[in-house]
Image (cartoon, rainbow, N blue to C red):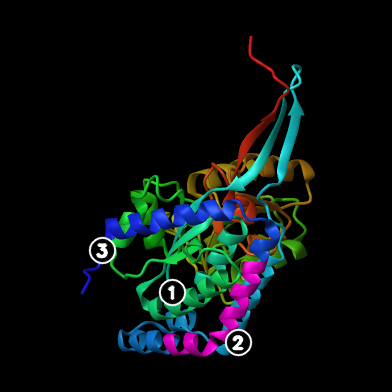
Amino acid sequence: MTEPLAAVDLIADLGARARRAAGVLAATDAEAKAGALIAAAQALRGAEAEILAANAEDLAAARAGGLSAAMLDRLTLTAERIAGMADGVAAVARLADPAGQVIDTTVRPNGLALSRVRVPIGVIGIIYESRPNVTADAAALCVRAGNAAILRGGSEAMCSNRAIHAAFAQGLGQAGLPADAVQLVPTTDRAAVGAMLAADGLIDMIVPRGGKGLVARVQAEARVPVLAHLDGINHVYVHASADPAMAEAIVVNAKMRRTGICGAMETLLIDRGYPQAEALIRALLASGCEVRGDAAVRLLEPAVGAASEADWDTEYLEAIASVALVDGVEEALAHIARHGSHHTDAIVAEDKEAAERFLAAVDSAIVLWNASTQFADGGEFGLGAEIGIATGRLHARGPVALEGLTTYKWIGRGTGQVRP
């Protein structure tokens, strides 16, 4: 019996195979990649019974292990969810291929023609938890942009991930692309995650998708560039000039539409000059939101609890919001700079000058004027599927879709130019 490879050797083997497959993908035209994804979508539909059986194994183990109801729901696959997964892969196939797109061109005075052209990043490692549909979503996005993928899913979904990956790889192979274009780490050993994070030269970029603990570990340990966000401590600032009806609608939606997503509002900043502050706070309370406020806010509404210093730095991901009164745009900007996470922040204002000051000064990946923070989503931005939200300052920011899975290279076309 062959002994399993140690984690470092395993990732080295997967990385070498992925690198070869990435070379093939980089030379594959858009139509062929789209066809391969259509084949993968068909293979997923055809493997419904196998995927459901594998998912039943995961669910049985998860229930025995005491997994929460919310986590069980994320893990559960149904015939409808598998069909939706396949439809999602097919939808990615219909998106415009970013690889090969010319970003810009220029001709130098000596006649040398220079172009910047989008190219795949290469090998992308994706580390994720719970949701087995990420296996298909991430694989499709990587392949469409011309990248090979190494996927490491959560241990609770290993059987489901294996079945989904097997079907996806079968579809790629039937379409003539290398099955190694998408590989699944075949072990639940946490050492494999560490080996991926240290695989500089084998993996070109890591994308973590999961809870705060996972993302924090990836960002702390990675020797490979990471595309991720850690917290979504998002603010809505209601300026003195805000329309009261608009402000109430935006604030309640930003907090309560879906409280557990990274684009949910966590802190509400109300200008002291805004005349309807009490009504705004009461609207939040009436929607079922617990409100924690500073001393000035508690004077306005006795149902508000006291906010601790930690509240301003907390991503609740539930029906809780912290609220503070601020003196104008500059104090709102200072609060966001001190407590924000560079994810998504919004201003509600009729004063254009105040709004433009806010849009220019807030250093977040997404900054909105008179719109809910819940729009922080690739689909809402017209990008199609997204692989995540990025809050760093390099490469991609905000919703990361196909374009964010490419880099660029310079191409020069000359007529014999030499440099004097």
Q: Which residue is mark 2?
A: 80
Where 367 falls versus 64 (above or below)? above
Asked if residue 323 is among those painted magenta in the image, a careful observer would answer no
Q: CA distance from mark 1 to mark 3?
A: 25 Å
| Identity, as a three-letter code, of the amino acid under mark 3 | Leu
The numbered mark, 2 or 3, whose residue comes first in the sequence reads 3
Residue at 61%, 51% (x, y): give it.
27
Q: Nearer the viewer, residue 144 or 283?
A: 144
Picture quadrant of residue 399: bottom right
Q: CA distance from mark 2 to mark 3?
A: 37 Å
Q: Magenta span has 43? A: yes
Disc 1 or 3, which lies upstream in sequence?
3
Residue 324 in sight: no
**Residue placed under numbered mark 1 in the picture:** 130
Residue at image point 38% right, 76% down:
158
* Closer mark to the observer between disc 2 and disc 3: 3
Magenta residues, start to end: 35-54
Helix, strand or loop at mark 3: loop
Q: Measuring from the top left, give residue 356's x and y in whole percent.
A: 73, 42
Per the model, the C-alpha gap separating discs 1 and 2 is 18 Å
Q: Which residue is mark 3?
A: 5
Amino acid at dot 1: Ser
Q: Please indicate, yes or no, whether residue 419 appears anywhere in the rendered image.
A: yes
Circle nearer the viewer, 1 or 2 = 2
The local crowd at label 1, few if under 14, some if 14 to 19, many if 20 or more residues have their Cα within 10 Å, is: many
